[in-house]
Image: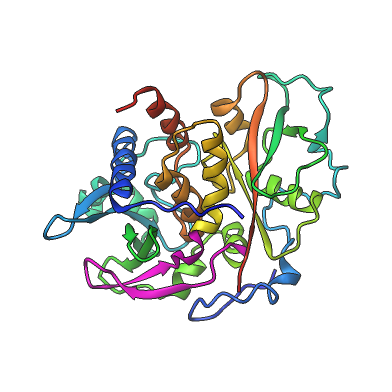
């Protein structure tokens, strides 16, 4: 049995910093938010989606690695002038938030997420689940995680849905061990998020995979 | 595949999901009886190239995942990752409670609806795309 791979909090923050650096390069809008005393923090991403299923602009979720304009810019336009809003008049816009925090007890990253309508009404887990693509539903039902639970966000103190981290090591360890065999520098956060993200509607552009290789050549 | 319609997403134990594991959920995926699907064919008789419909994929096992006897496959460019996952699961005769992940660059899992042709353009070298695959248990 392989020894489990854990990461310490400093390592977590370092991986997040590298991840965000690439995010900024491709306009994927991930941010680091420090806690009030700045001793720790988390990564955060917000994107907007129309509830009828078609995606107006999928921040960072384009599977072809295209860079999209941040949705916030579109929403700054007056409604009358916005063609996109016109076609979406009968639908509702949903704001998705994804937070990546560090779990001291499990020593792995944890994905917190929530969704709400623009007027602040939160979506239930059932609503979110219905917005997940069919093939991801299969993965969610079969993947190596057993529950999505609702918990209080450790830093914000607000209710979020959480993909439980207890199995994270089990699916991360084989991949990391395999990469280490050839001395490949793997960004744990990138790898982990590429696996768990699609389960909750979050897709990473392919360029993140290439960023890891580039970092190898620019060793800090 | 029956959709779960619970208000709280308590995922069913793996035994409950057992019967539905191999349902074809991707519209692009035919349900191949391995390895006779025309979209995925073994061998190296088709040279890979920019104008060819199929690309060469080399599949490598990670961890204690079973190794496929045939590792090199010619795959249509439009085949999605999810389609490839379904194919490998059937080929390896994985049970429904086991999930399979595919990685490029040994560490990054592309989205299930990503086309292999695109992955080949980004990560292919020496005329082939190397993909690692890893089995995971679903625990109840």
Residue A111 placed where, x, y %? 39, 60
Residue A70, can we see it? no
Residue A38 placed where, x, y %? 14, 55
Tell whether A49 sits left or right of A182: left
| Residue A151 on the magenta span | yes
- State the quadrant of the N terminus of chain A: bottom right
Q: Nearer the viewer, residue A76 or A110?
A: A110
- State the quadrant of the C terminus of chain A: top left
Tell whether B136 sits left or right of A42: right
Q: Nearer the viewer, residue B126 or B111?
A: B126
Residue A173, can we see it? yes
At x 39%, y 22%, the residue is A217
In which image quadrant can residue A96 be found?
bottom left
Where does the magenta region start and end?
Answer: A142-168
At x 70%, y 45%, the residue is B84
Q: Is residue B125 above or below residue B20?
A: above
Residue B112 placed where, x, y %? 59, 48
Q: Is residue B65 above or below residue A89?
A: above
| Residue B64 on the magenta span | no
């Amino acid at each position: 049995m392989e020894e489990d791979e854990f990461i310490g909090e400093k390592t977590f923050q370092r991986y997040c910093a590298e991840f965000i650096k690439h995010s900024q390069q491709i306009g994927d809008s991930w941010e680091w938010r420090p806690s009030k005393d700045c001793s720790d923090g988390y990564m955060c991403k917000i994107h907007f989606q129309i509830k009828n299923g078609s995606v107006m602009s999928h921040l960072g979720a384009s599977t072809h690695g295209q860079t999209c304009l941040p949705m916030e810019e579109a929403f700054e336009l007056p409604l009358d002038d916005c063609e996109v809003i016109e076609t979406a008049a009968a639908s509702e816009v949903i704001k998705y938030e994804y937070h990546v925090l560090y779990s001291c007890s499990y020593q792995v990253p944890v994905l917190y997420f929530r969704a709400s309508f623009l007027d602040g009404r939160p979506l239930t887990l059932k609503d979110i689940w219905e917005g997940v693509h069919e093939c991801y539903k299969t993965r969610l039902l079969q993947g190596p995680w057993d529950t999505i639970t609702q918990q209080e966000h450790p830093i914000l103190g607000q209710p979020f849905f959480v993909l439980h981290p207890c199995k994270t090591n089990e699916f991360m360890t084989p991949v990391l061990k395999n990469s280490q065999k050839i001395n490949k520098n793997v960004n744990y956060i990138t790898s982990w998020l590429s696996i768990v993200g699609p389960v909750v509607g979050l897709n990473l552009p392919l360029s993140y995979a290439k960023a890891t290789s580039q970092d190898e050549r620019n060793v800090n | 595949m029956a959709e779960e319609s619970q208000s709280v997403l308590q995922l069913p134990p793996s035994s409950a999901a057992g019967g539905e594991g191999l349902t074809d959920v991707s519209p692009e995926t035919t349900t191949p009886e391995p390895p006779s699907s025309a979209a995925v064919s073994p061998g190296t008789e088709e040279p890979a190239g920019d104008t060819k419909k199929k690309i060469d994929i080399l599949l490598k096992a990670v961890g204690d995942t079973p190794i496929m006897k045939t590792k090199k496959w010619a795959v249509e460019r439009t085949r999605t990752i999810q389609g490839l996952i379904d194919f490998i699961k059937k080929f390896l005769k994985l049970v429904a409670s086991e999930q399979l992940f595919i990685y490029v660059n040994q560490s990054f899992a592309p989205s299930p609806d990503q086309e292999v042709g695109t992955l080949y353009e980004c990560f292919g070298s020496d005329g082939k795309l190397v993909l690692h695959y890893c089995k995971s248990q679903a625990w109840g």
